[in-house]
Amino acid sequence: MDLVMAFADEARSRLDGLVTGQLPVIRQAGAMIAATVRAGGVLHAYGTGHSEAVALEVAGRAGGLIPTNRLTLRDPVVLGSADPGEFDPLAERDPATAHQVLALHTIEDRDAFVIASNSGGNGSTVEMARLVKERGLPLIAITSLEHSRAITSRHPSGERLFELADLVIDNLAPYGDAVLPTEHGPVCGISSITSALIVQLMVAEAIGLLLADGTAPPVYLSANIPGADAHNDALVARYAGRIRTGAL
């Protein structure tokens, strides 16, 4: 088997299937994001493991919306006073982590959340979703329904991410994420690729809706083009203290 072409074909098929099957809920998510921006709110993004890449696609991205904020497992160390030497790589499984992370961010009633998790079952992911819903905030989930429905949640409640969100977008990744079978096990994870497309489609819908009603969308220019810093800094200042501006 030519694994390169097999993966390229698999990726194309799943991306096409995502646009065909998930577009209605993606448009709903875009409308939710547009409403958040109009209200002066911030879209917060949380993901652990490889799903942190999805949060990076949401927040602080060239061509993306400025009122976005990324929450990470490392925040108790980076933003708080936790000892780096005591950072637990399995913190994503602990519900208490969500409380520690969320406490380090400014969350307002006009904000919204997107949480990405392929499995949707780790303790911190589920607890973060529960905390978001306890605050009455809109929640978008990006997850693999095939994987999530096949697992037992690590959260004491037994809940999974898709059972808590207002909008659930299926990234169409299979159980275990990898899409190509080999004699040594499946290879080539797909969730990062499909989830990145989901994010960009949501953002495109949100910006399109803002433009349609005459609202100037606050968007990041690439920091690597002349004049971008002045443009970005002026817009970021509107959300001072509410959005992450550092790379960590």
Image (tube, rainbow, N blue to C red):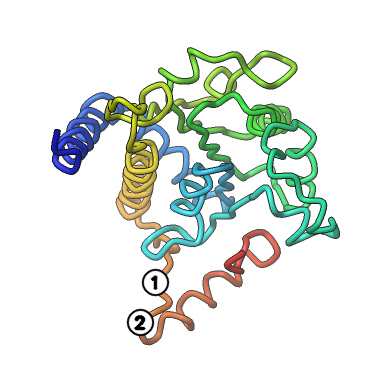
**Quadrant, the C terminus:** bottom right
Callouts 1 and 2 close, C-beta under 8 Å: yes
- As drawn, 193 above or below 79: above
- Which residue lies most toward the front here? 183
Where in the figure is residue 105, as x and y percent of width and height?
Answer: 73, 52
Q: Give the amino acid type for the residue marked by disc 1 in the picture.
A: Leu
Mark 1 and mark 2: span between their CA atoms? Answer: 8 Å
Measured from the top left, where is residue 186 in percent x and y? 34, 28
Is 227 positioned to the left or the right of 106 in the image?
Answer: left
Which residue type does callout 2 highlight?
Answer: Ile
Residue at figure coordinates x 55%, y 37% from the top left: 115
Where on the picture, by quarter, is residue 184? top left
Which secondary structure, mark 1?
A: loop
Along the line of sight, the residue nearer the viewer: 133 or 110: 133
Q: Name the residue under label 1.
A: 221
Give the residue at x 40% y 85%. Answer: 227
- Residue 225's disc number: 2
Of residues 89 and 209, the one drawn nearer to the viewer in this rendering? 89
Number of callouts: 2
Q: Position of residue 94 (x, y in %)?
A: 74, 32
